[in-house]
């Protein structure tokens, strides 16, 4: 931490803490930067075997923490979350850093306090994913109407609450464009940290493709499964778990193998040996593609979102490419991209791919974030 900030009272606010995912990896490094900060979250229900990233800190939570089994349904409490986040009192803090992808940026602070929001994304299912989300309730008209009212209110609150942020920091150019679109606010871009220390370069690639993700609809793993059903001579490994497991297994052919949830060491082993990573979702940033590149494994990705910041597509640079993009989010486009990749596979140098990933290290994230916060606080 910059010594000029050591005397300041700092709070760090995260939306909710129920698993150790990408946003929590960012939080982990912010805690490392400011170890004396107090941590706040609406709910803290992290499993015991994943709690190391909290560095032994006691998280200050809202009254939602006392609700039984809240970790199973907290997302359905969206109508009241804006109200709940506003109940935290930050009057004693000089600096408040919010790690926000839902409501934490809506905290209340005073004119003498600095509020910096590291924005993973504006609330996607209230904005650009709204119609897709609402369509889930097409067969339940009353619920659909109720959700329309809820998200109308959420959008109004989301814009108004953005005015209380002194400075937005975006994870990627894609997120920065969304902040500008919805909040009419500028932001600076600091890419999330990627811990590459355990992802070692491997020159020995096997003849399989891999996808690593939580099995949920927006990850669009169905595209990958459909694509490989048309390429029975190629093998796809799916690493992960989630509510879409049954759906994906029902459409999968015998050349698609489900490995299940794995610890980071096993994931690294599979990634490092893969022919390429398949990444069919539109992400705000995307850490797995960088982990793959750190092992020298190229990426075949849907060319939209945060991936534009982290992968050098062969279509734009045949000298030092780290992947291939497909531009229509369907399996036909992915099949074409895989064919293009194999036609040009000799252009992909594992050493150059791994070197590219080094631009997104934990150390660079901490240095950039600390310097940005220091410059805003003087």
Image: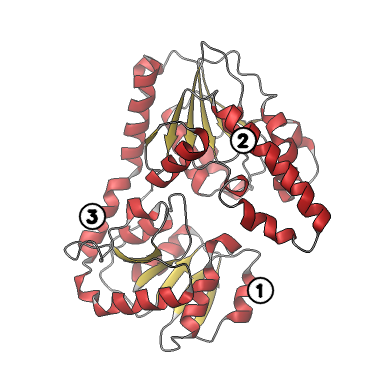
For mark 1, does the 10 Å Cα neighbourhood hold few (<14), some (14 to 19), or many (20 or more) residues?
few
Most distant residue in the bottom direction:
233
Quarter of the image containing the C terminus? Answer: top left
Mark 3 or mark 1: name the one nearer the start of the chain.
1
User: In x, y percent, where is residue 131?
Assistant: 63, 54
Vertically, is 267 above or below 285?
A: below
User: Which residue is outermost to the top?
Assistant: 112
Query: Is residue 113 in view?
Result: yes
Dot 3 alpha-carbon crowd within 10 angstroms: few under 14, some 14 to 19, many 20 or more:
some
Could you tell whether 81 is left or right of 92 in the image? right
**Secondary structure category for the residue under label 2:** loop
Q: Position of residue 91 (x, y in %)?
A: 60, 14
Q: Nearer the viewer, residue 204 or 315?
A: 315
Callout 3–callout 2 Cβ contact below 8 Å: no
Q: Nearer the viewer, mark 1 or mark 2?
A: 2
Q: Which residue is mark 3?
A: 355
**Name of the residue lying farthest toward the left:** 319
Picture coordinates of residue 170, whole percent (x, y): 43, 38
Spatial CA span between label 3 and label 1: 38 Å
Q: Which mark is residue 103?
A: 2
Q: CA distance from mark 3 to mark 2?
A: 36 Å
The residue under the point 24% across, 61% down is 316
Q: Nearer the viewer, residue 98 or 61?
A: 98
Q: Is residue 310 left or right of residue 279?
A: left
């Amino acid at each position: 931490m910059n010594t000029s900030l050591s005397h300041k009272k700092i709070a760090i606010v995260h939306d909710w803490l129920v698993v150790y995912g990408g946003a929590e990896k960012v939080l982990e490094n912010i805690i490392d930067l400011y170890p004396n900060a107090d941590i706040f979250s609406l709910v803290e229900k992290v499993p015991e075997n994943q709690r190391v990233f909290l560095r032994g800190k006691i998280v200050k939570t809202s009254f939602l923490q006392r609700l039984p089994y809240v970790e199973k349904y907290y997302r359905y409490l969206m109508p009241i979350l804006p109200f709940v986040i506003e109940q935290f009192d930050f009057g004693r803090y000089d600096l408040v850093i919010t790690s926000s992808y839902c409501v934490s940026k809506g905290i209340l602070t005073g004119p003498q306090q600095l509020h910096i929001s590291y924005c993973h994304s504006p609330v996607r299912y209230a904005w650009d994913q709204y119609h897709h989300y609402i369509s889930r309730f097409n067969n339940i008209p009353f619920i659909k109407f109720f959700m329309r009212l809820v998200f109308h209110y959420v959008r109004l609150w989301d814009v108004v609450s953005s005015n209380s942020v002194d400075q937005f920091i975006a994870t990627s150019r894609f997120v920065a464009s969304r902040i500008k679109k919805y909040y009419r606010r500028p932001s600076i871009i600091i890419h999330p940290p990627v811990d590459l220390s355990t992802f070692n370069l491997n020159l020995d690639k096997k003849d399989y493709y891999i996808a690593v993700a939580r099995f949920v609809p927006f990850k669009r793993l169905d595209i990958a499964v459909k694509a490989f059903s048309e390429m029975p001579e190629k093998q796809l490994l799916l690493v992960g778990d989630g509510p879409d497991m049954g759906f994906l297994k029902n459409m999968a052919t015998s050349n698609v193998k489900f490995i299940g949830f794995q610890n980071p060491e096993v994931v690294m082993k599979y990634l490092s040996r893969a022919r390429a990573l398949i990444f069919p979702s539109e992400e705000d940033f995307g850490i797995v593609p960088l982990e793959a590149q750190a092992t020298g494994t190229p990426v075949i990705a849907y060319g939209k979102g945060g991936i534009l910041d982290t992968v050098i597509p062969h279509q734009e640079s045949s000298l030092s490419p780290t992947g291939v993009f497909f531009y229509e989010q369907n399996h036909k486009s992915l099949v074409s991209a895989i064919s293009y990749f194999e036609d040009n596979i000799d252009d992909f140098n594992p050493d150059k791919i791994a070197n590219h990933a080094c631009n997104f290290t934990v150390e660079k994230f901490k240095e950039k974030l600390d310097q940005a916060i220091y410059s805003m606080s003087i």
